[in-house]
Amino acid sequence: MLKLRQALVVEGKYDKNTLSQIVDAPIFVTNGFGIFKDRDMMALLRTVAKQRGLIVLTDADGAGLVIRNRIKSAIAPQYLLHAYIPDVYGKEKRKAAPGKEGKLGVEGMDPETLLRALRNAGAEFLDTDSEADRAQQPITKTDLYELGLSGRPDSRAKQLALKQQLGLPEHLSANALLTALNCICTRQGLEVLLWHPESSTSPSPTK
């Protein structure tokens, strides 16, 4: 499995499942056209894009183009990469019939095609055997508890303060917060933000 520096955004959970078997990266889901009404998700994508870059990988049909353009209009271009899959006609195994335009979506692409699309977009693949990469452990639910961000009487207030400091949506769930933190912080950086919030108004030094 190849590790990406950038995060990915796709249309649906089946797209995410397919990609998660190929690349090691945070993968966000728009839930189709749900992204048009989900301000919290768009705010999260904007924050993640600024910190590590975001690759947009939508289906090759008209709906995928509309969703891609919505993201493109909301996030500055210097933080975005655009990956495109080819027009391949057919249907995914789980579906009874092809989609409206008869094209396979991201979930129907083979691994080689998806990796080619990512490379063509300029995705940055990391060396997972490097000492620095091995030393950078992900933030876990246990870490959130130990740092007082979950399971404590004042955890809700601490979470809210952290979200405000990092520019994250107020209503992110605990799981979504964990994903976001792993996009923009190391554990050490998170500790600095919690213990010395006055030392940084931006999460950028932590990743």
Image (cartoon, rainbow, N blue to C red):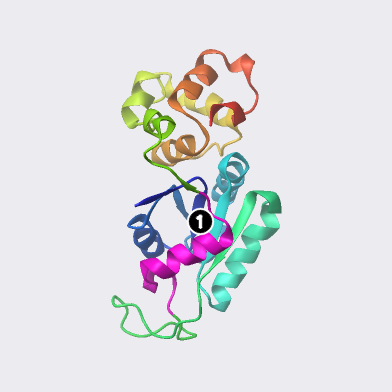
Left/right of residue 69 with respect to residue 176 in the rendered view: right
The one nearer the camera, 16 or 152, is: 16
**Rendered image quadrant of residue 151:** top left
Q: Which residue is drawn at 68% across and 54% down?
A: 74
Asked if 33 appears above or below 166 in the picture, the reply is below
- Is residue 110 shown in magenta? yes
**Rendered image quadrant of residue 71:** bottom right
Residue 36 visible, this angle: no
The one nearer the camera, 172 or 17, is: 17
Q: Residue at x 52, y 17 (%)?
A: 192
Amino acid on which the number 1 mark rests in the picture: Val
**Rendered image quadrant of residue 177:** top left
Magenta region, residue range: 104-124
Asked if 3 appears above or below 37 in the picture, the reply is above
Asked if 159 appears above or below 66 in the picture, the reply is above
- Is residue 60 shown in magenta? no
Q: Residue at x 29, y 75 (%)?
A: 94
Asked if 59 appears above or below 82 in the picture, the reply is below
